[in-house]
Amino acid sequence: MTNKIIAIQGNHPSKLNPKTDTSIFLANEIQKRYKIFYYDPRDLSVISSKVIAKGFFIKFNYNNKKFYKILKKQKLDLIKCKFILIRQDPPFNLEYISTTYILETIKNKVKIINNPTSIRNISEKLYSIKYKRFMPSTIFTQNIDEIKSFFKKNKSVILKPIHSFSGNDIYLLSKFRLNFIKKFIKKHNYIMCQKYLSKISKGDKRVFLINGKVCGVISRVP
């Protein structure tokens, strides 16, 4: 079975939306070539120095109302896989971080996408600091005075949690709402504040770069 299995570490399929979730699109294409072994992050273990996942082989079918079928439940030594895809949603919490440490122990024996070390070390939103000259005016903070000053300068501001995903908990504020902001910071700690660009209502572009080469682009419309 070596190199005939692709493992997916992700949220249980019952929690996914087949119309919008990229993991299902990827899995649907993968199953044309390989067997798919699917497991939840909480079912990842280290047993006798082996990285073991308790999960199931699965088949996806968009034509059925229930778009997936669990074929066989079992435990699997993950170094038997050709690839492992890390696909679970944030929050980027200690469970998430712990799985990166566990998978890191086998990353030289099996290809893991994305590299667990990189996932842990690179915060998606904070990494954008490197590209601030291409961005609207932006600050990262949990200091109320800094946020108030930023509001005064930019009038309309977008608030984003640093470790959220899929557009969750993103707010447009056209006036300074102190109590709301305090609750937002209490829930999310560090946040990203960004000047609102009105033309975003018409959508933005997502550009795909591979080894520095533009390989594709899509439009995202809110």
Image: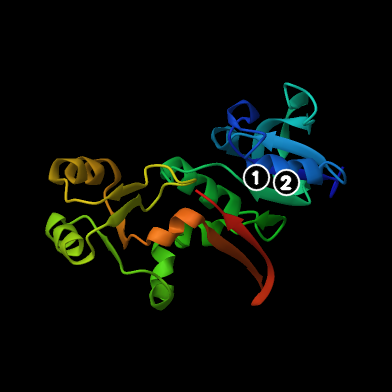
Say which residue appears at 49% left-offset and 45% top-offset.
166
- The image position of residue 78, as x and y in percent, is 71, 44
Q: Relative to 113, say whether 12 is above or below.
A: above
Q: Which label was assigned to residue 64?
A: none
Q: Relative to 96, say whether 217 is above or below.
A: below
- The image position of residue 119, as x and y in percent, is 52, 57
Could you classify mark 2 by the number of other residues whose Cα lies within 10 Å: few (under 14), some (14-19), or many (20 or more)?
few
Three-letter code, disc 2: Leu
Q: Which label was assigned to residue 22?
A: 1
- The image position of residue 98, as x and y in percent, is 48, 46
Residue 88 visible (yes or no): yes
Residue 211 visible (yes or no): no
What SS does tag 2 mark?
helix
Q: Are marks 2 and 1 in contact (CB under 8 Å)?
A: yes
When asked about the image quadrant of residue 74, the answer is: top right
Q: Relative to 134, say whether 125 is above or below.
A: above
Q: Relative to 168, say whether 201 is above or below.
A: below
What SS does tag 1 mark?
helix
Name the residue nearer the viewer: 136 or 199: 199
Three-letter code, disc 1: Thr
Residue 111 is left or right of residue 32, and the answer is: left
Q: Which residue is mark 2?
A: 26
Residue 64 is left or right of residue 20, and the answer is: right
Name the residue nearer the viewer: 129 or 202: 202
